[in-house]
Amino acid sequence: MQRDNPCGRWEIQVKGAGVTPYSRESDGRKVLRSSIREFLCSEAMAALGIPTTRAASLVTSDLYVNRDPLNNGRRRPERCSVVLRIAPSFIRFGSFEIFRSRNEFSGRQGPSPGRHDIRAQLVDYVIDTFYPDIQRSHGNRKERNTAFFKEVTVRTARLVAQWQCVGFCHGVLNTDNMSILGLTVDYGPFGFIDRFDPEFVCNASDRRGRYSYQAQPSVCRWNLARLAEALGSELQASQAGAILDEFMPLYETLYLANMRRKLGLLRRKEPEDQELVSELLRLMHNTGADFTNTFRLLSGVSCPVAGEGKGATGGPVVDLILEQCVSLEELKVANKPTMEPRELAMALSMAQTNPAMFGLVADRPEVAHQLEKMGRLKELLSTNQDELRAKQREDWLLWISQYRKRLVKECDGAREVCTIEEERIRVMDSTNPRVVLRNYIAQNAIQAAENGDFSEVRRVLKVLENPYSKGMEKDKEGRKDEGRTDGNQNCVPYDSKPPVWAREICVT
């Protein structure tokens, strides 16, 4: 862990131990359910190579508190527990908002408004302790602080690019959950995408989708803007604005670089790579393909070689990908418009009675998106499962064909084609995880632990420590950890797409 923390300093926090000055009106307790999720995901993210706080221990208590796990107004007693977590620092963006003056719109202010002297001390401490190179390189305070803010921006862009590329959704990305060191912090209602959906929301209480998967980059940028405001006179506003303007282009560059590795595009950067990635995600969305498993399968696509047979078109891989796609009925549910029925009815009525006005309304992104979903739903309602699979197979074969054409350029002019192929497969399999902490995996571990059996937590932890392994690890008795039985006593492998019952899991 030392390599992840060059300053050599570790801060310890106990989460769920009781009331603190930051508990507001809550009891400061953490239940076993959420503690297991945080413990496992902290370690899973570290194994994936994503900057994160770490979990050192999880201790249960005899104390019970009432919670509403399904967010349906029905509270029940749940066992308390405490997670011991560690990080070089737990200072957040929100830590600097303590000193903010009253906001003229919201009327809110920090607990220490106007204490710029303490804010200056906090800035000095953070830079001197965690950014020593910046401290040494700048004699001018404003220049130093600008360099500090730029580095925080870079780390944040890098972090969210890594999240997007493994399908991780944080769930509550407010300024208090953004680390000043670019770490993943506070594992509350997180989730990993199963069926790929850009609108994926892992927090059942986030009804407006503020923290959806596709919104994460822009939300991180928004939080950086709030950090710049909180730093106030410690930064020059024009320089902070210029750095913020660089965030999205930087994120997109980092994201595309990660996606190239996920696709094994290692030797060249081609203009069509962005479109290749976009088309892949669009196809995954339209076919309801499993995000993690689909990327993992793509290393099985071979680079075209002279004289190859007809069976080398990628058909076998496509057949495997189709097994990772959801059913027709699931796609119908996924494509139901989410706009309020009354608003949607008004828009459709306007299309008939006032086409000119409707043209203006339909240009709004939200309305256009809802109309697009209605179009897809209409197509799905007029087909059957066999026709759908045939169309999906055709679409996947077309994309695989484009992908293989791009792979040809990787080998262009190279003598050792086999060596290049071996390297491509090695990088893809070490970039695309075989297993992530899906909700059904966590839920099985939680249910066993709530019944006093922590063996599943330990088993899952062992699997998550090697997310890129090619197969399940064997236990001391030589058995493979293939998965835990579900409520119907059917074995669900950890690297499987979710069972049907997993759709009912509620995380808040």
Image: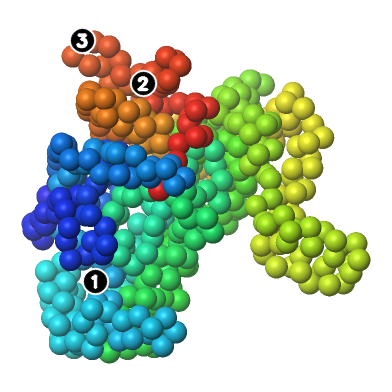
Q: Nearer the viewer, residue 463 or 190?
A: 190
Image colouring = rainbow
Q: Nearer the viewer, residue 265 or 508?
A: 508
* Identity, as a three-letter code, of the amino acid under mark 3: Glu
Q: Position of residue 176 (x, y in %)?
A: 30, 65
Residue 300 is at least partly visible in this image: no
Spatial separation of the CA atoms under disc 2 and disc 1: 41 Å
- Whether 70 is drawn above or below 199: the answer is above
Q: Name the side, left or right, on which 252 lies relative to 356.
A: left
Q: CA distance from mark 1 to mark 3?
A: 49 Å
Residue at point 20% right, 10% down?
477
- Which of disc 1 and disc 2 is earlier in sequence? 1
Question: For the residue marked with disc 1, what is the amino acid?
Answer: Ser
Q: Which residue is mark 3?
A: 477
Mark 2 crowdedness (10 Å alpha carbons): few <14, some 14-19, many ≥20: many
Mark 3 and mark 2 lie on one chain; the one further toward the N terminus is 3
**Residue occupied by mark 2:** 483
- Circle count: 3
Judging by the rendered image, the residue that carries numbered circle 1 is 95
Instruction: Kindly indicate whether the residue at mark 1 contacts the one at mark 2 (C-beta within 8 angstroms).
Output: no
